[in-house]
Amino acid sequence: MILAVSSLKPPHPRYRGRFAPSPTGPLHAGSLASALGSWLDARSNQGAWLVRIEDLDAPRCIAGMDQRILAQLQACGLTWDEEVLWQSQQLKTYQNVLETLYSDRQIYPCTCSRQQITSALSSQGKLRARNQEQIYPGTCRHGYVWQAQLPEAMPPSAWRLALKPEQVIRFSDAELGSQEQNLNTDVGDFVLLRADGIVAYQLAVVVDDARQGITHIVRGADLLSNTARQIYLQGILDYPTPQYRHLPLVLDPHGEKLSKQTQATEINTASEAAALQALQAAALHLGLRNLSDGQDQTIAEWLLQATHAWADRTKQISRTQN
Ligand code: GLU
Ligand code: ZN
């Protein structure tokens, strides 16, 4: 154990936001709206805005897509303030955190196949509908004997977090108001290291948000259901919990979330006028009305105006929440 978890505690009191794209495809209308929302939130708070490339899930990443996304952000005037961080270069850090969690008896190996989980759940009468996430029945946790240190000669397996009982997580979302999730009944012992050796999103995002001193997380509402898990992890790792704000999703004409699967098309940033048009569409999705049409404006001028509009919208939301 080289790096103590407490040494990861960030010393930054000022606003620090971030955009954390996965390089699985270029920016589309939905991801641009998330990027713009978090950029505007940082700028309207005179804060710093960071970009982090979440490229741990190598089989889903596309070579060169990180650079393409960075170029798209740049073409849209969404500039960042510090060096870009690639998660694939932080593996040692995640490993250290996993070792700490192991020595705190917080994680255990799980060798259950999907089928084993399903049959265990169905024999307990706890199988959920097909489209719902199944709650791990704890099979491998029962009877597991923790060693003093993470055993080296271990068959490859997933590592799950041993949730403490009665973990009802509550938080106030700056966009959506008060939120609550019971981790034991809604999520169960979730995976922090996958059986294929890939560090799970939940762990990496929490470690990096803390290491980068992120104070405000503004992202799409599709990530809302992950937030309670992340807040729980922050608690056991002794990290501060940032303020969360989940933005309305951009939907396709069928009311489905835009993603590569639903053929979300790449935003056009071939010219300044095209990029401005993409930004305007994103601003409308974020609920910013009455912005000028951008005629005779540079992107920088339009962004400044949008920053003020964002600050007004934020004030309105916090008035209706209080
Ligand atoms: N990398 C995640 C995604 O692209 C976002 C992570 C986050 O903002 O927390 O969906
Ligand atoms: Zn198991």
Image (cartoon, helix red, strand yellow):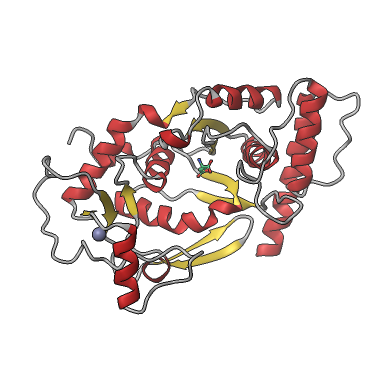
Task: Give the x, y percent position of residue 282.
Answer: 74, 40
Residue toward you, 213 or 105: 105
Seen in the picture, residue 305 relative to 320 is either above or below; the reply is: above
Residue 212 in view = no
Task: Give the x, y percent position of residue 253.
Answer: 76, 52
- Quadrant in which the N terminus is drawn: top left
- Choose top left, top right, bottom left or bottom right for residue 126: bottom left
Q: Residue at x 32, y 46 (%)?
A: 194
Q: Is residue 187 left or right of residue 171?
A: left
Seen in the picture, residue 66 relative to 211 is either above or below; the reply is: above
Task: Give the x, y percent position of residue 283.
Answer: 76, 41
- Choose top left, top right, bottom left or bottom right for residue 120: bottom left
Residue toward you, 128 or 291: 128
Q: Residue at x 72, y 44 (%)?
A: 311
Task: Give the x, y percent position of residue 152.
Answer: 12, 40
Q: Is residue 20 left or right of residue 250?
A: left
Number of numbered discs visible in the structure rendering = 0
Residue 75 in view = yes
- Quadrant in which the C terminus is drawn: bottom right
- Choose top left, top right, bottom left or bottom right for residue 146: bottom left
Identity of the residue furthest to the bottom in this view: 125
Q: Is residue 92 left or right of residue 266?
A: left
Q: Residue at x 56, y 65 (%)?
A: 178
Q: Residue at x 30, y 34 (%)?
A: 93
